[in-house]
Image (cartoon, rainbow, N blue to C red):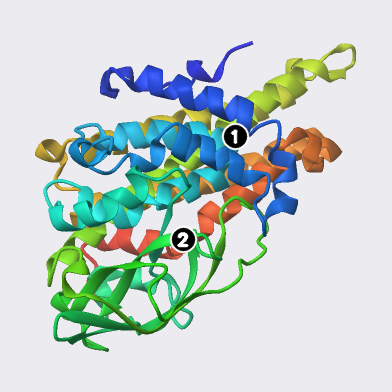
Amino acid sequence: MRSIDEITRPKEYLPPTDQVMGHIIREWAEKEIIPLRRRFDEDWRNHRIIEPAFHKLMVDMGMQRASFPEDLGGLGMGHSEHLGTSSFRVLEEISRADSGMAVAYGVTFWPLFMICNEPHVNRRLCEEFAPLFCQSDEIRFAANAMTEPQGGADIENLDLLNGSTITTTATRDGDEWVIDGHKLWPTNTGGIAHLFGVVATTKPGSDDPRDFAFILVPADTPGVTQGDPYEKAGMAADKNGDIWFEKVRVPSWYRACGPGDDFKYFKEVISIGNLGSIAMVSGCMLNVYETLQKFTSSQTLHGRPLKENDAVAGVLADVVRDVEVIRITGYQYARMIDRPDLYGERWSDEIVAKGRAYKYFACDRAVEDIAKAMNLMESCGADREWDVEKHWRDLKIIQLWMGGKQLCQMETARWFYVCESL
């Protein structure tokens, strides 16, 4: 049978270390995740099964150190010329086993991108927080505290709303920020986050980008409360809950980039979030492809393997066609992120819009294709023994996050058609 490595990956884009890193992550996933993932759903609250696998990845393998500069004990991803392609490969490999683990791992770096990435490195904050991630024998998670109960992900609709709907406030009091507000659903909450990147406004209702603030807040700061995790349809390895900030005080220099720059560089977080989403879709669908290979080769119809039936072959072709396109599109977007000299900065409106388009294309195709796969497998499609229904539930969640399909469509149309009121 064909292997997933024969699904096209643009090899000319990849750094020399890609094969080594890819094989290391795949070996970890094969050993630590795939044999256990059917038990993850029941472990959504306590993570007794999930946490040891995270420890292996993040502490033993050192992956939680990725963003920080090498001289601070990190792996230097923040100034890597292969940030996009390397991130895609890692997240794809993890998602092939469990996309919930991929999002929990990937989102840990969202707040860190704001302080660790060239050309906007905040050296003082890197030095402040590097020991938390680089000198610890414990798992360290970070969370991007963005979404709010009253408006969901409209905070991401930056070009239209300019942060005007943000209700979490950051008030300057001498050499401190005082933060008040309520965040809902951030990945890595539910009690496990050690560091928050908090999206706030310094002037409620303002649409001035200079009033958009991104402030680092350690989770043990007085006034920070994390609620219990929510039970979701899937992605048990990704905990989501509420966070309340009540008169939380942090030093004034915990603001990531400063007035105007917080707004600008937060768009980079959105671009990389789109990239990560495509990688997770690709990883899930690669595993579905593997399952379909096994199922249609072992099951028979009229004395022949199921895959030899014309109608079945048509469905299989549709699935693998889309896996090919999703993967190639994802790596192309990663390459665009890695080559600002050719395609523009990672935080540009163009890169954000194109990432939105690729993300919702990948999600739409994958959700449609996995439904075809489940129909083809009949009752086995819903049987947890085959793991396809797990990817089905997880893929739907990927389709819903970061504003869902509608915000993707709005930002795509806004840029390509120069729409001003969307």
Please report the residue visible at 25 percent of the width from the left and 43 percent of the height from the top: 68
Q: Earlier in the sequence, mark 1 or mark 2?
A: 1
Please report the residue visible at 25 percent of the width from the left and 69 percent of the height from the top: 214
| Residue situated in front as seen by the camera: 63 or 165 | 63
Q: Name the residue tied to disc 1.
A: 97
The answer to which quarter of the image holds residue 256 is bottom left
Q: Is residue 119 left or right of residue 389?
A: left
Task: Residue 160 in the image: state x and y as whole percent.
Answer: 26, 74
Label 1 with label 2: CB-CB less than 8 Å:
no
Please report the residue visible at 66 percent of the width from the left and 46 percent of the height from the top: 392
What is the CA distance from the residue labelled 1 to the residue labelled 2? 23 Å
Residue 191, numbered label: none
In this rendering, the answer to whether 223 lies above or below 78 is below
Task: Residue 173 in the image: state x and y as whole percent.
Answer: 18, 87
| Residue situated in front as seen by the camera: 139 or 272 | 139
Q: Name the residue tied to disc 2.
A: 193
- Density class for disc 1 (Cα within 10 Å; few <14, some 14-19, many ≥20) is many
